[in-house]
Amino acid sequence: MQASYDQQLTKITLSPPDQLNPPPVDLKKVIETRTSVRNYSSHPLTLFELTYLLWSTQGVKKNLSGKATFRTVPSAGARHAVETYILINRVSSLAPGIYRYLALEHSLLEISDDQDCSDKITKGGLEQEMIRNSAATFIWVAIPYRMTWRYQERGYRYLFLDAGHVCQNLYLSALQLNCGVCAIAAFDDDKLNYYLNLDGKSQFVIYMASVGKLS
């Protein structure tokens, strides 16, 4: 499943998952050293590194005839009711702006090249400076109907569980690339939903995380 989008927007095809070969790491060490990082170096992420982080958090491993997908993160009933938007500040080969990850197509969609987008997202994030200073900030958007048609009211619980799975994968995969992550749950819902053109009901921001190179 994937939310519809304006076909006129610029779409960027990303490197195939089988070409993503990050440095090997000791998983035990990664788990032991995982922590929230709010200060980043000025070095940009490469497009390869961003692609790996996107695939690690929402990558499609198998598509079941358009009915469901198996991804790199678990989801209740394989509903995958979370879409990924990204604030790009410093990523090589990408202009700053707001993008959306199209998981089924493994591509990036340019949503906005507004020069003030970083300030607007930071303001919606209650002026937390790691958003403005990040190389990129992941913004996860929930589409509750994907869950609630099957699980009714309980589906709202699963939305938050799914968002947690996604964010933890970001923490772990980022360490492979010598990057730090800080999860963000404190934000102004109305401001972020408005800026991303979401109605706040059928689609709404559920979680965020800033990412940047370690100093």
Image: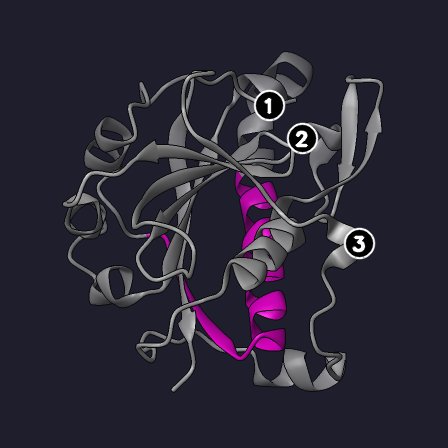
Amino acid tagged 2: Leu
Label 2–label 1 contact, CB within 8 A: yes
Closer to viewer: mark 2 or mark 3: 3
Quarter-wise, where is residue 202 in the image? Answer: top left
- In the foreground, 178 or 170: 178
Quadrant in the picture for the N terminus: top right
The secondary structure that dominates the magenta segment is helix
Q: Which residue is mark 1?
A: 2
Amino acid tagged 1: Gln
Q: Mark 2 to mark 1: distance in Å?
A: 7 Å
Q: Which mark is residue 104?
A: 2
Q: Secondary structure at mark 3?
A: helix
Q: Left of 69 or right of it: where is 154?
A: left
- Image: magenta residue range: 160-185
181 vs 115: above or below: below
Residue at (26% x, 38% y) in the render: 113
